[in-house]
Image (cartoon, rainbow, N blue to C red):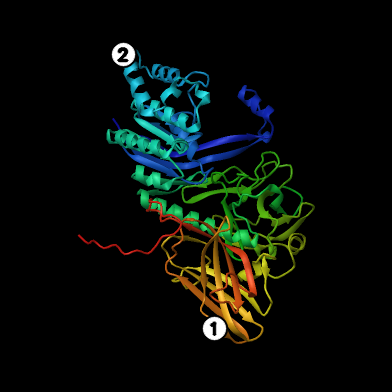
Amino acid sequence: MSDNAIAMRGLGKRYRLFRSQGWRVAEALGLPVPNNVSSDFWALKDIDLVVRRGERVGLIGRNGAGKSTLLKIVAGLVRPTCGEFQANGRVTALMELGTGFHPDLTGLQNVRAALAYLGVTGAAAQVKTREVLEFAELGEFIEQPFRTYSSGMQARLAFTVATTIEPEILIVDEILGAGDAYFSLKAVARMRALTDNGITLLFVSHDLASVQMMCDRAIWIDRGRIVDEGDTLSVCKAYVAATRKQENIRLQASETGFGHGIPQSDGEFITLTGRLVTGAPSPPKGRHPIRSLRLLHNDEERASVRLGDARDNDPEEDLHAIAVSGYTNWSASQSSNDSPSWREFRDEGGAYHHAPFAIRLPKLLNNYRALTVEIEHGATIDDQVRIEFSTGEAYFCAGVLAPTEAGNWRVETFHLPEQLAEVFGPPHAPSPHPEDNLVEGDAYGEGAVQIGSVRFFAPDDASKSEQRVVVCGEPLSIEVQWTAEERIVHCRLVVAIYTMDGRCAAQLISPVSSRDRGPHLDRVDLKPVRLGPKDYIISVGIFRNLQNEHRNGTEPLHVLDRRFRLKVVQPPDFFTETGDYLHEANWRRLS
């Protein structure tokens, strides 16, 4: 018998996305369906994975990454499109609340039906039923219809039934998140006991503490590919670091207007459409490989996509290809042994002769001229391949791809055309300075001073890269650049930190000083941050004659009121709740 419980090699799952439900029904009935009524969507691609018997493996990643699709393949609910897959052993999957339970039957009736389905009858069924009732602890509710149960009660019953008959491979996908803390601890103890007896566990949860507590190996999945795998702590730390980077961009975006995965209504976004097209109104004569697209704002990456990879045409992503058979000229995914995947801009019979892509941008972005698109390509000399962007009414050329020799790749950067900047944004030159991106309003003061920029960064970071997500217990520096229009005799700087419900969590007040007319730079170091894990909003102000007995600043010179966002998170390997404030404390053993 193989030591592998699960083995995958080159596994991929493709879905056909139809332009209308009628074509989907026609395909389901086995009727011929034209190619130009659907497009391919790869939920997973090139998955190589081996899980040995008795391993406890956690799958982590953001929503839509492909975790559930992978589990459905293991559970036998979905067949892979390509690649090799093998599961050695009986699989029990807990993936959706209520699956396999009849809503109108009582809990007890559902338990007996489930046991009968698993082949447990007679006296053995009675014993197992008692075990289920004791572990689930539903009391008199066990005699009530399943549809009347809360999500937590459904999770209790489903988990208990699934684990009463020991499976060889157990899949748990977020279902325990619906339960209470007491039952979750019981469930974790039972899963540990089962794995000690040799079963294999695949566990999916956004609660990294649970993953680290349950699993000895973790796999990080994003956009349909395995990004990282290894010991649980290392992978979770890498995932947290990436999440913090994304969250850092998101928090800055709430101030500068640039969104990256920010949940806003469609009305607050615009879609910028780009495309590859030949110089003539005709399809390309050659085959032009395109490997990746990156969107940059002030030279900082905001979104990217690797063409030909899984989910490269996912409309939920901020940057994605628009690949519709019969209308566009993107090829299917291409690959080779010595190169990652790509798509080609070539003659695919597309009615519009082009290969388009979409970029989702927030309406409030106040510096569109700072946008650039970076393209990694292998364009040939067969055509003049133009890069064009649209306002919705017309396309404007941003440049032409420079031809490359066969088999070579190059990276080129294209700026937003002047016409688009005039339509979408104010006509000022791009600037890397944060003060140029401050949201107008939410500022007041007498005007004797002007705050130019406020930076948040790690004290040991020489580049002072912006940091808006900090781990509780780590240091943080806040630097304020400002200018005095006159001499200020009694001056104090204040950094006020508020919780999102408006309560003041902390105020950092500088000593009294006198300042001459001209530029000044002040810095406060939090060594370390002692605020508890949550979201905060920060005001920065400069006051004259602010005394300790004053409740509020009586002479505000310039205040940026509740302008900056900060998120404090727990360390990835620290599970105990810290509360709203982590005090410095010295413990001594006295006896």
Question: Image quadrant for the N terminus?
Answer: top left
Quarter location, residue 404: bottom right
Residue farthest along the right direction in this orientation: 393
SS label for mark 1: strand
Q: Position of residue 382 (x, y in %)?
A: 66, 54
What amino acid is found at the position of numbered circle 1 in the picture? Ser
What amino acid is found at the position of numbered circle 2 in the picture? Ala
Q: Which residue is at a point 39% across and 35% down the rendered structure image? A: 183
Q: Is residue 125 above or below residue 256?
A: above
Left of 585 or right of it: where is 61?
right
Work out whether residue 363 or residue 543 is closer to the camera in this orientation and state it: 543
* Residue position marked by numbered label 2 in the rendering: 123
Q: Position of residue 207 (x, y in %)?
A: 44, 45
> Would you say residue 7 is visible in this rendering?
no
Task: Determine crowd level at label 1: few under 14, some 14-19, many 20+ residues with C-alpha closer than 10 A.
Answer: few
Left of 102 or right of it: where is 399?
right
| Number of callouts | 2
Q: Which residue is at a point 39% across and 28% down the rendered structure image? A: 136
Q: Is residue 526 above or below residue 190?
A: below
Q: Is residue 401 above or below residue 429?
A: above
* Residue position marked by numbered label 1 in the rendering: 513
> Would you say residue 340 is visible in this rendering?
yes
* Disc marking residue 177: none
Q: Position of residue 221 (x, y in %)?
A: 47, 45
Quick one: label 2 or label 1, which is nearer the N terminus? 2
Quarter location, residue 170: top left
Distance from label 2 to label 1 (Cα)?
A: 85 Å
Residue farthest along the top direction in this orientation: 122
Q: Position of residue 360 (x, y in %)?
A: 66, 52
Q: Which residue is at a point 69% across and 58% down the rendered structure image? A: 364
Q: Nearer the viewer, mark 2 or mark 1?
A: 1
Task: Determine crowd level at label 2: few under 14, some 14-19, many 20+ residues with C-alpha closer than 10 A.
Answer: few
